[in-house]
Image (cartoon, rainbow, N blue to C red):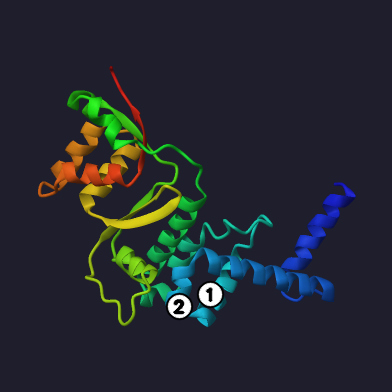
Amino acid sequence: MSDLAHFQRDFVAALGAAQPRNPALAVYRNTAIKGAVDALADNYPTVAMILGEATFRALAADHVAASPPSSPVLAGYGAGFPDWLELQPICQALPYLSGVAQIDRFRTESHIASDGAALDPTALAAVSAETWSASAVTLHPATRFAWFSVPAPSIWLAHLDAQEGDIAPEWRPEGIILTRLHGAVTARRIAAADHRILFGLRVGETIGQAATAAATLYPQADITAAFREILASGALSTLKKKGF
């Protein structure tokens, strides 16, 4: 092992010690921890808003201790925070908290995702119904969506809108989609049929297959309207015609 490798190993070990013996290392370690906690607060603002600064920072410090940053670039730090949070006792009292954290993460990912062209609804005017149904699509790189067993989307959106007073959504499963259109990240709740369509498209189903599956599972849903809203949101990118 090279001298540099020895130094790096010993330096990291010293930083990880509960009480570094070198005062300079202790200062550096505390500064690094604070930087990571600050990054979590920036990346999970809704969770921080719900918990309050003191509680959030204490929880964030525990996460940093369990999963320290692997890179000095902290803009994307905390990818595992929602899953870690779900295992913490606080989620027994706030069962929606890890879902809210996941949506916070989605917003970060959607914001920093690579650019891509959104599928233009007007360009589909010349596409026949048969071709449309038999085609698959790619999702825009910034598209993120999920389904939750709790109303995490409503709670997240309410805090995003800075609603005052008590937030009391109907306690039921909900979905959300985040997209980036014209440079701005937008989010909206989605119904179960919308989520099934998006899931199907993501795994490679054709538009017709995704529509049929959603209509079978949710016969009361307006599948045409669901596709129209998904398309208008900028969630889709490229039409991949199959067999034509």
**Residue 176 visible, this orientation:** yes
Q: Relative to residue 151, is residue 241 depicted above or below?
A: above
**Given contact means CB atoms under 8 Å apart, are the residues at marks 1 and 2 in contact?**
yes
**Residue 89 visible, this orientation:** no
Q: Relative to residue 45, is residue 216 depicted above or below?
A: above
> Residue 177, position in %: x, y?
34, 53
Out of 22 and 48, give the one closest to the viewer: 48
Mark 1 packing: few (<14 Cα in 10 Å), some, or many (20+)?
Answer: some
Residue 224 image label: none
Q: Secondary structure at mark 2?
A: helix
The earlier-in-sequence mark between 1 and 2 is 2
Residue that lies at the very extreme toward the left in this rendered image: 220
Residue 51 image label: 2
What amino acid is at disc 2? Leu
Can you identify the residue that label 1 sits on? 59
161 sits to left or right of 224: right
Out of 148 and 160, give the one closest to the viewer: 160
Mark 2 packing: few (<14 Cα in 10 Å), some, or many (20+)?
Answer: some
Q: CA gap, disc 1 to disc 2?
A: 9 Å
Give the residue displayed 42% in from the left and 76% down from the top: 50
> Residue 239, position in %: x, y?
33, 30
60 sits to left or right of 132: right
Give the residue displayed 83% in from the left and 76% down from the top: 23
Q: Relative to residue 128, is residue 173 depicted above or below?
A: below
Q: Quadrant of residue 117?
A: top left
194 sits to left or right of 105: left
Q: Secondary structure at mark 1?
A: helix
Out of 33 and 182, give the one closest to the viewer: 182
> Residue 102, position in %: x, y?
42, 60
What amino acid is at disc 1? Leu
Closest to the camera, between mark 1 and mark 2, is: 2
